Amino acid sequence: MFSFDQILAITFTLFAVIDIVGSVPVLISLKEKLGHIDSGKATIASGFLMVLFLLVGEPFLNLLSVDVHSFAVAGSIVIFVIGLEMILGVEFFKSEKDTKTGSLIPIAFPLIAGSGTLTTIMSLKANYEETNILAGILLNLVIIYIVLRSLSWIERILGKAGLMVVRKFFGVILLAIAVKIFKSNLNM
């Protein structure tokens, strides 16, 4: 059953974790190195990974004898660390900087649909309906596509200070979301 409140919460959660706006400086740098970022290909590839993990992530966990609530608690810790990264400007998770594969690596994976995003999708399954998560993923894919297509414009509008403020703001939101997921899955 579709719930506007759930879709909104999921969309903002994924938006904060994916941090496409906070990734704009990295994306601009990659665009300069690559000469071009294929927005459509990067969006489709990252969307495929997110939807695949949404659909088969739970059976995969069952194969490993891990329940969704345990994964959600572990995921909330990862989300918390990502929020700390955003606020403190410290990099705990290192990503590959190989630009030879263009729009798919490192843009679609791990920058957009990385471990934080996939963990968040599984964590969200513990609290939200799957159809609402899918809607939140699709809304984020639209945002991702628009941002990728508008990199130069976004850089001019926000400036370096604006990008930093947006990143820090979403870091605090992520910390609050992580605490909520942790608390709701610990008290089963």
Image (spheres, grey):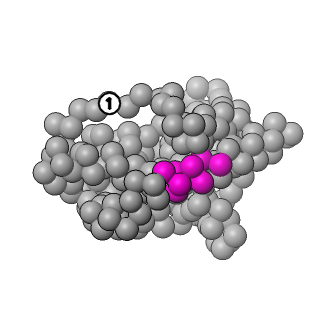
Rendering quarter of residue 84:
top right
Q: Is residue 151 visible?
A: yes
Front residue of this view, candidates 140 and 24:
24
| Magenta stretch contains residue 166 | yes
Pick out the residue farthest to the right.
187
Up the image or down, 99 lies above or below 172; here it is: above
Considering only vertical position in the picture, is 110 above or below 35? above
**x and y percentages locating residue 26 in the rendered image:** 33, 45
Quarter of the N terminus within the rendering: bottom right
Q: Residue at x 32, y 65 (%)?
A: 156
Magenta segment main secondary structure: helix
Name above or below for residue 145 compared with residue 56: below
Q: Where is residue 41 in the image (x, y as percent from the top left)?
A: 25, 56
Q: Is residue 125 visible?
A: no
Q: Which of 59 and 70 is in front in this view?
A: 70
Locate residue 138, reporting x and y percent.
Answer: 46, 64
In the picture of the structure, the residue carrying the numbered disc 1 is 96
The relative height of residue 158 versus residue 35 in the rendered view (above or below) is: below
Q: Where is residue 7 in the image (x, y as percent from the top left)?
A: 62, 67
Magenta residues span 164-172
Instruction: Choose top left, top right, bottom left or bottom right for residue 160.
Output: bottom left
